[in-house]
Image: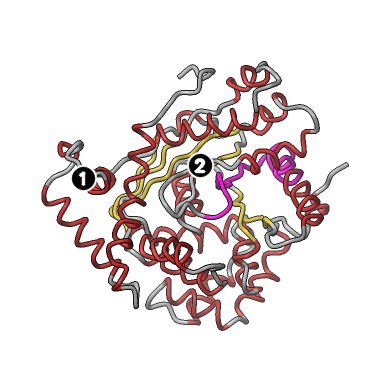
Amino acid sequence: MITESDFDDIRPYNDSEVVEVINRLLQEEAFIKFAQQLFPGFTKEMIEKALSEVKSIKEFQGNFIIRLAQHIIDNTTKGITIDGLENLDPNESYLFISDHRDIILDSALLNVMMHHHGFETTEIAIGSNLLIQPWIADLVKLNKSFVVNRNVTVRQMLESSKQLSNYINFALNTKKSSIWIAQREGRTKDGDDRTQQSLLKMLQMSGGKEFCSHFKNLRIVPVAISYEYEPCDAMKTLEVHLKETESGYQKTAKDDLRSMIRGMINEKGRVHFNIGKPISHMLDTIEDMDESKDKFKALADLIDYRIHKNYKLWPDNYIAYDIVNNSKEFLDKYTIEEKELFLKHMEKKIATIEDRAEDMERLHQIFFEIYANPVKNRLELTKPEFVED
């Protein structure tokens, strides 16, 4: 029989562990400095007092994480909207598979919206490569995050994937906790959101040979999140360029930490979530496909179709598409003023990339493609033949 103790190395903390973990965090100067960065004006004593009163995960999220996320919303966005909550039953648990634009904020902001609308917050999948300090691991596991192990051997990967699959199944169907997981490993860097079939194959590992009944039991809900201004658009632009120009380029842990912080403090404009309908009713059709058809590809195509269809397109997306394609196709979707503002935003962000003046034309192109690709995906949207809506 599978129990929570089978997942002690990857699971989130539970209420019985909260006080001990918070006491550890309060001994970490790096955590205190991090909290003060995000809560300007808060003294060390104020942070210690607020956290010393926390005795449960729900209190930690309500007194610290939700307040932190609301501070980010108030100071770096022009507001958040959400559609599709009517597709959910507040008493049910779901596996939210989402496009992935920001390391921390995609799931954090979704949880704020869920909290404000009377839903339980989700558990969050987070890569072990981001847990570069023990205090960061403590912080995210207090925030209902579970660990996806990265940088392991092939043999370890098989064992790790099976454990992860079993945990997700356990959380959904025994703990009755909803789960947020990105549709791919790492954020999309070019704005082209695609579900990795390897993710779906990992999820299948806890279901044996059963495809349809197992994925029905996971209750997958596609989620589309879109930012008017990508929080880390300049850093993504640089990363894509470095991969093109420097053989063997690899991000460092310091790069990930910088992305996490900049994602929280950079401007985002408007932010929108679209919660799709659970896809359970389509799984029978996929199950009945001819054996020559790839069921995992069909499921990935279905999730991508829902995300691309539901993705909120902003004026910036249409502006970038017209610039990339040297067209006037979407002139009715934006004003001259909106185009000028976007170009100023681009110049300001590209200016933060040092020592790349000789590559400016390519940097501009990469930057625009980040915003243009969601429009391209919408234009090329093809409903899978088995999809009803």
Residue wearing tag 1: 326
Extreme-left residue of the structure: 336
Magenta range? 166-186
At which x and y percent is residue 143?
Answer: 59, 59
Q: Given the image, on which type of amino acid does mark 2 rest?
A: Arg
Query: Of 13 and 46, which appears nearest the observer?
Result: 13
- How packed mark 2 is, by other alpha carbons closer than 10 Å (few <14, some 14-19, many 20 or more), is some
- Which one is in front in this view, the residue at disc 2 or the one at disc 1? 1
Q: Quadrant of the N terminus?
A: top right
Check disc 1 and report its element: helix, strand or loop. Answer: loop
At which x and y percent is residue 367?
Answer: 33, 57
Mark 2 and mark 1 lie on one chain; the one further toward the N terminus is 2
Q: On the picture, is 332 further left or further right than 62?
A: left
Asked where in the image residue 29 lies, by quadrant, the reply is bottom right
- Residue 39 versus residue 383 in the image, above or below: below
Residue wearing tag 2: 194
Q: Given the image, on which type of amino acid does mark 1 rest?
A: Asn
Query: Of 100 and 158, which appears nearest the observer?
Result: 158
